[in-house]
Image (spheres, rainbow, N blue to C red):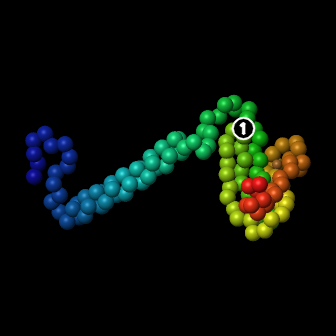
Amino acid sequence: MAHPLQLGFQDAASPIIEELLHFHDHALIAVFLISALVLYIISTLISTKLSNTNTIDAQEIEIDLEPAVPSLGVKTDAIPGRLNQASFIISRPGVYYGQCSEICGANHSFIPIVIESLPIKEFLN
Ligand SMILES: [Cu+2]
């Protein structure tokens, strides 16, 4: 039934449009939940203290290292101006060598990557 000054559609008057309206409401809930999740993730990324999201100078983006230590199974991107972290468990103490695995510049092959693993008691002393 139509009402004066009605903003939306008329009420559903057939089974097919009733189902379509149910689907519309269901899809709207899904869209709302996804939007809320995306907004939450964006606000978390913007407000975190763990990474520097401000790029000071466009020149600083030129170098993009990708250190990798094969014996530890670790490979991560390193971008100047941004603090990256990678956590992993090393099963025994030692010195592990790696390499840059992205062609980053003229001295790409001379970038030393060394991880020294110590027991926690030695590390704290
Ligand atoms: Cu490199």
Position of 84 with respect to 66 (left or right) is left
Q: Which residue has dot 1 on it?
A: 61
Judge by depth and name the residue closer to the eye, 14 or 88.
88
Can residue 98 be spotted in the picture? no
Q: Residue at x 61, y 43 (%)?
A: 51
Image height check: is 62 above or below 102? above
Secondary structure at numbered mark 1? helix
Position of 71 with respect to 82 (left or right) is right
Which of the 4 image quadrants contains residue 122?
bottom right
Q: Residue at x 23, y 60 (%)?
A: 17
Q: Position of residue 112 (x, y in %)?
A: 86, 50
Number of residues whose C-alpha sits closer than 10 Å to that of mark 1, classed few (under 14), some (14–19) or many (20 or more): few
Position of 49 with respect to 31 (left or right) is right
Say whether mark 1 is within 8 Å of ligand 1.
Answer: no
Image height check: is 77 above or below 15? above
Q: Which quadrant is the C terminus positioned in?
A: bottom right
Can residue 11 be spotted in the picture? yes
Q: Position of residue 84 (x, y in %)?
A: 67, 48
Q: Amino acid at mark 1?
A: Ile
Q: Position of residue 70 (x, y in %)?
A: 80, 63
Q: Residue at x 20, y 65 (%)?
A: 15
Image height check: is 71 above or below 41? below
